[in-house]
Image: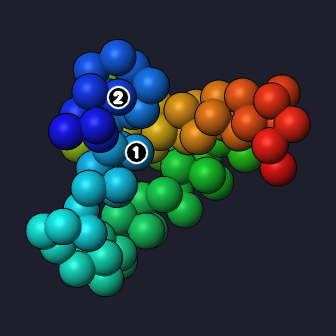
Amino acid sequence: MKIYEATEKKELSIGQSLYSSCAFFVDYSLLLDANMQNRIKEYNYCKTFSCPPFPSLNDTPYNIVSEFMIIEQEYNSCMQTKQKESNNGIN
């Protein structure tokens, strides 16, 4: 229940709460989907080199835009958590 409450209070992102609670109902190895790992690599490449995955937003499939947005949200959430921990002297 604490994970749910933390998510509701916005202390944890949806991704963080799913990861924290998935041990109760799924094998972690099932989360390591090769296609999604490739999508994360594609996202990192596009972000690092400032190049879109397709020539235009209209040409980009909806699922790629959606997945990139989720990856960006989780990345930002992790960076905020890391920043809070370093500001509190927790390393």
First reached walking from the N terminus: tag 1 or tag 2: 2
Outermost residue to the top: 9
Decide which of 65, 83 is in the foreground and name it. 83
Q: Where is residue 47 in the image (x, y as percent from the top left)?
A: 65, 41
Residue at position x 44%, y 68% in the image: 38
Q: Which mark is residue 2?
A: none
Amino acid residing under circle 1: Gln
For the N terminus, give its image quadrant: top left
Q: Which mark is residue 16?
A: 1
Residue at position x 39%, y 33% in the image: 13
Q: Where is residue 77 in the image (x, y as percent from the top left)?
A: 54, 32
Decide which of 46, 33 is in the foreground and name it. 33
Q: How crowded is mark 1: few (under 14 residues within 10 Å), some or many (20 or more)?
A: some
Label 1's element?
Answer: helix
Q: Position of residue 80 (x, y in %)?
A: 65, 29
Amino acid residing under circle 2: Ala
Outermost residue to the left: 25
Q: Is residue 27 left or right of residue 20?
A: left
Label 2's element?
Answer: helix
Q: Is residue 41 left or right of residue 61?
A: right
**Residue 46 visible here:** yes
In three-dimensional space, the C-alpha distance between marks 1 and 2, rounded to whole angstroms, equals 10 Å
Q: What residue is pinned by disc 2?
A: 6
Decide which of 44, 29 is in the foreground and name it. 29
Q: Against 18, is 52 above or below? A: above
Give the image quarter of residue 57: top left
Q: Residues within 10 Å of mark 2 (few under 14, many from 20)?
A: some
Closer to the eye: label 1 or 2: 2
**Residue 66 visible here:** no
